[in-house]
Amino acid sequence: MGHEADKRLEEICESLDNLTIDSLQLMEEKILLNVQLENLLRQGHIDLAKARYIRGKESIGMLQIPSEDKEAKSIFNLETTFDESQGESIPHFDISLKTKSKEDDKEAQDPIKWFGLLVPQSLKSAQKHFQEAIYLTVKLANLQSQMAEISKQSESLRSLKKLAS
């Protein structure tokens, strides 16, 4: 029996080691994605400032955003699914651009059109950077979810290890 307990303890330790390696890899990926997100947001703000400089601060600002009587709608669909593995509910996020439908034409309206038909290229570039930042944020949320799951698994394995030793 002592040999089986030692073998079981060794398996638990190996699983903990593998979870730690997975956790470190996810942390590294999260750090890289955070750096990319910071760069995208910084570039988006710089492009927005260029567009305001070119067109004037009054032509690109809060006054062009729809008020309460005109509702601003998202151009993205966010789907949340839950993976029910091992009795735990792990969220997974997916985002996509809405497509125009014939019955609800206003739902997928491009917000850049709030600022006129001929907008500066820097405003289009800012929009592109901010949209990429949204996609990256979803990746980060999924990574965070994976990291939380690994943390839960590690805690349960540590408890099991205490009982086995």
Image (cartoon, grey):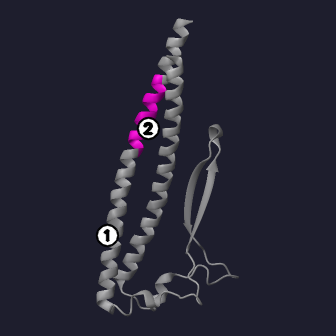
* Left or right: 69 in relation to 127: right
Most foreground residue, 26 or 69 = 69
Q: Is the magenta stretch mostly helix, strand or loop?
A: helix
As drawn, 157 above or below 50: above
Residue at the spot of label 1: 42
As drawn, 5 above or below 75: above
Residue at the spot of label 2: 22
Spatial CA distance of label 2 from label 1 is 30 Å
Q: Where is residue 45 in the image (x, y as percent from the top left)?
A: 33, 75
Query: Where does the magenta region start and end?
Result: 13-26
Most foreground residue, 13 or 43 = 13
Going by the numbered disc 1, the residue's amino acid type is: Arg
Q: Where is residue 65 in the image (x, y as percent from the top left)?
A: 48, 86
As drawn, 84 above or below 133: above
Mark 2 element type: helix
Residue 114 colored magenta? no
Q: Which residue is drawn at 49% across and 33% down?
A: 154
